[in-house]
Amino acid sequence: MIEIDEKDLHYWLEHVKIYANNGKVADYIPALANQQPEINATAFYPIGDKEVACAGQADYSFTIQSVSKVLTLALALIQHGEQAVFSRVGKEPSSDPFYSIQKLEVEKPSKPLNPMINAGALAVTNMIRGRGSDEMVQEILNLVRLLADDSSIDYDEEVARSEFETAFLNRALSYFMKQNGIITGSVEELLDVYTKQCAITVNVKQLARIAAVFANDGKDPDTNQPLLPSHVARVCKTFMVTCGMYDASGTFAINVGIPAKSGVSGCIMGVIKESGGLAVFGPALDEQGNSVVGMHLLKDLADDKRWSIF
């Protein structure tokens, strides 16, 4: 079991936070454009009812953005099973940017390559049960609250509205897939759910606990009670390894070597098997859309702790 304490986190966060100068915040979502690059935080949530380690501004709240793709995938797998989910979305990584429409035009029948790109995530969200968008969002929130052990978690209405109003490319992806039978129902309702799931707000301690559930094969990191089926946790972690860091996933696997998922708010959720969950927040992003500070922190910690699964 890998041990990480606050001394480790403080040391490495201080060591890498200067790299925020090398990135820029996600300004294509108006509500995210005002994030402050100097705000950085990290937390490690250990398995086994031990004390959580934090560094930086650990109580600062941010939206999870594409980290939600892992959680909606887990929910869809629980509700419908692997056969149904993977009839709509593939299992293979993509070398294209997460927002690309290119592969939809060459794949038959326009099936997204995986659930971690936007097209695949939209297809997965379209499968969440509920009579309308409010019930679908509630299903997603219920799962997030369960994994984080915090019933107060909700979505940021301003960020959700901002994303909904500017989701032109995601609308195009959705209508393209609707034309080809991959998604069904109202595209506007789907975008309402999708933008709200991306706008779910947490801090690094809450996100680290969610990661710790996956690290513990779907069981509560404190009580060891099942929260997710183990096979669902396994499938999600596999996608995090192969597709979780956008089109930098291969490089990340070599440099860090753990299941992880990033979001364009600047958060990264990392899974250290049988040890715990790690979360990092730093809103300055690199060209692939990953937190610059987070990428450096995870690489340095992985080197120091030798935690690569490879």
Image (cartoon, helix red, strand yellow):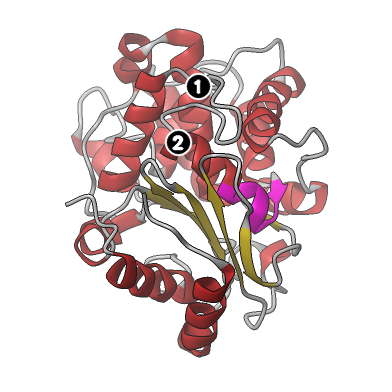
The residue that disc 2 covers is: 214
First to last magenta residue range? 201-208
Above or below for 63 versus 58: above
Q: Is residue 176 left or right of residue 42?
A: left
- SS at mark 1 in the image: loop
- SS at mark 2 in the image: helix
Q: Amino acid at mark 1?
A: Leu
Q: Is residue 234 left or right of residue 202?
A: left
The residue that disc 1 covers is: 228
Q: Please say whether residue 207 is one of the residues in the magenta stretch.
A: yes
For marks 1 and 2, the one nearer the N-term is 2
Above or below for 57 versus 117: below
Residue appearing at x 19%, y 62% in the figure: 254
Q: Position of residue 50 (x, y in %)?
A: 60, 47
Q: Position of residue 191 (x, y in %)?
A: 62, 35
Above or below for 143 versus 102: above
Residue appearing at x 73%, y 24% in the figure: 138
Image quadrant where residue 237 sits: top left
Q: Amino acid at mark 2?
A: Phe
Above or below for 283 versus 115: below
Which SS does the magenta portion mostly show? helix
